[in-house]
Amino acid sequence: MPIRKIGDFYVNIEDGKKQLGIDSNNISGCIKEYKSGKYDGVFGSADYGFKEDNFDFLHELSNVKKIWFNDLDLKNIDGVYSLKSLEHFGVHGKRTGLNFALLENLIQISTDWISKDEKLDSCIHNENFYFWHHKPKEKSFEKYTFPNCSNEVHLNWSNVYDLTTLNGLKGMKRLRIHRCRNLVSLRGLENYRDTLEEVFVDTCGKLTEYNFIGNFPKLKLAVVNGDVLKNENPIKLLS
């Protein structure tokens, strides 16, 4: 994020929109600044002064459309339920579980694996899903329910062996997989063969079974650990 200090506040300016950094040493001042009407979202991390173990301050910022917080250790996240206009959810670190049915307007979700999260499949408007640090003892997605739909999906640091238990994600067009060291097969992606257009896999050293995806009818670009299976647009690079 292109974060800068403007006056007394940290500000992120992205795509012409501004998000305000929440500083634990000046939460009341941040709330007042946000209500000036210049912002559409808030963010926070220890690097920018955020040290809270709760999201209670969000109750006073009900029109927030975007949140991005990382390196957290939250004891209470309930404040997020007051954000009825929330479209972009990005929260990373330790936190309590969320009922995503109460966040029905989300179009982008970025989250670590939290076993107590529920009803992600109620996110019927979701377009982009970023999933991090998934390491359940069963080493599969069998106990995890993904959003009902997503055009673009990123799986980062999962311990799964294959994708046969991947679920939800109707209409998935683009898939990125990074640093899944147990992954040996892309089996399961045949369930998405009629929509997948791009597949990019990186740093998955045990992966050997994947060539079959080259036959997917809408696939335009596929790169697996540097092996280019298909590229109908050589100028485009994936990362």
Image (cartoon, rainbow, N blue to C red):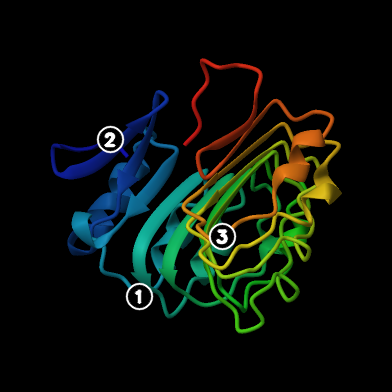
Residue to which mark 1 is pinned: 53
Q: Choose mark 1 or mark 3, whichever is in front.
A: 1
Residue 2 image label: 2
**Secondary structure under badge 3?**
helix
Q: Horizontal placement of 170 versus 68: left or right?
A: right
Look at the numbered discs 1 and 3 and tell me whether their residues touch, using CB distance below 8 Å.
no
SS type, badge 2? loop
Q: Residue at x 70, y 25 (%)?
A: 220
Amino acid on which the number 1 mark rests in the picture? Asp
**Residue 125 in sight:** no
Q: Quadrant of the N terminus?
A: top left
Q: Amino acid at mark 2?
A: Pro
Label 2 packing within 10 angstroms: few (<14), some (14-19), many (20+): few
Q: Which residue is mark 3?
A: 82
Sequence-first disc among 1 and 3: 1
Q: Is residue 136 left or right of residue 171?
A: left
**How far apart are the two marked residues, 1 and 3, measured between alpha carbons?**
17 Å
